[in-house]
Amino acid sequence: MNLIFGSLLLFSVLQVIHTYGVKASKIANTKQLSENTKRISKRGSSDRILNGNEVEFSEYSSAASLLTLLYNGISCTGTFISKDVVLTAAHCVYNTTTGPLSPEEVFVSGGTKSILQNITYIYKVQKVLVHSDYNSSTFNNDIALLFLTNSTSDPSISFAKIYNIPVTDETPVEAAGWGDTAKDGSGGTSQVLMAVPIHISSSDDCNDSNDFWKSNNGPTICMMVQNEQDTCPGDSGGPLYFTGDSSKPIVGITSFEVLSVDSSTIECGNNGDTAYFTNALYHIDWISNNTQIDAKDLVFDKDYLNSPASNSSSASQSTSVSKPTSEIQTTSTSQSTFKSQSSTTNTSPSATLSINIYTTICTIFLLYNFIA
């Protein structure tokens, strides 16, 4: 009886998010951005991959759906990289007022392409680790790790490797995520995982829109929206997959987009806009240190790891194993000393109602045998 009641409550949580959710806040930093642009994150509760296709989950089975209690209740995407670790974006699990969320405020779903089915595949989080140098205004170091309370034994979940070959404009990639089917957020939440081809770019526009971008083998990877194919709020933290291999290693993490202020609304899929992904390989040492998984076991191409090309690449491409640090012990709680770098989201009355209902339901749900 408890399990049935809990399942009904979780379904209600998903419906509350869909019904009352609002878009993520706009974040503009005039010191880093030109006057004709504005920067937005891609977390949200109603927007999704635009002009993509429903996927065969077996080919994208490392994707994870995230639900959090941040602001009015947001949804994001993540990637399983081991049995008990999910890789995502820092801004998905970071409150600009209080810092990283507590583990009790984050829920992970995996093993299915639908976020409204097979709801037994829900995992509690025991530790939320946001990069210590994450900047919520510029989205620098927009990366986080979620450590699950229990390791998954679900055979339908795979664990993505990190792509460790230099990224070029010709590198074939797709972004995956859940969310709305319309660029203005009016299409309703997609029940299934979607993927869309992404066009990596090294054009001057990448640096014009983001002063911190220097190349696609640095901290961030740039893409240019073409054919109105884009990621949107709700895809934040999700994987940018390399599609040149059936194992689909992860190249980047969906982070933020720079839009023209000429747009009257925050929309996805405007041709010519630039979007940025956190470069997973750039942070390989940080990931290895804090998961205590050797870098050689995290990367896609072990042969390339020791090749002359790899050894001659920049330090940011390093895949050497570093000694474990204490960061995982000092940055995992919601009472972090991180300072807010931007204003919090201004929530509407419906947003306030959303978080109250969402918090209440999740609290009750945890009391009813949420996970054995």
Image: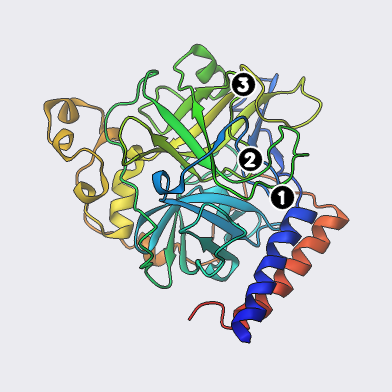
Residue 65: where, in percent of width, then height?
54, 54
Three-letter amino acid code of the residue under disc 1: Thr
Residue found 25% across the figure and 57% down from its top: 293
Three-letter amino acid code of the residue under disc 2: Arg
Residue found 50% across the figure and 56% down from its top: 112
Between marks 3 and 1 in the image, the one whose residue lies nearer the viewer:
3
Residue 34: where, in percent of width, then height?
64, 20
Q: Nearer the viewer, residue 92 or 16?
A: 16
Q: Give the residue at mark 3.
A: 273
Q: Quadrant of the N terminus?
A: bottom right
Q: Give the residue at mark 1.
A: 344
Residue found 66% across the figure and 56% down from its top: 97
Colour scheme of this structure image? rainbow
Q: Give the residue at mark 2.
A: 48
Which numbered disc flags the more N-terminal residue, 3 or 1? Answer: 3
CA separation in Å, label 3 and label 1: 24 Å
Q: Is residue 173 left or right of residue 272?
A: left
Outermost residue, top side: 204
Determine whether label 3 and label 1 are within 8 Å by CB: no
> Is residue 321 in view?
no
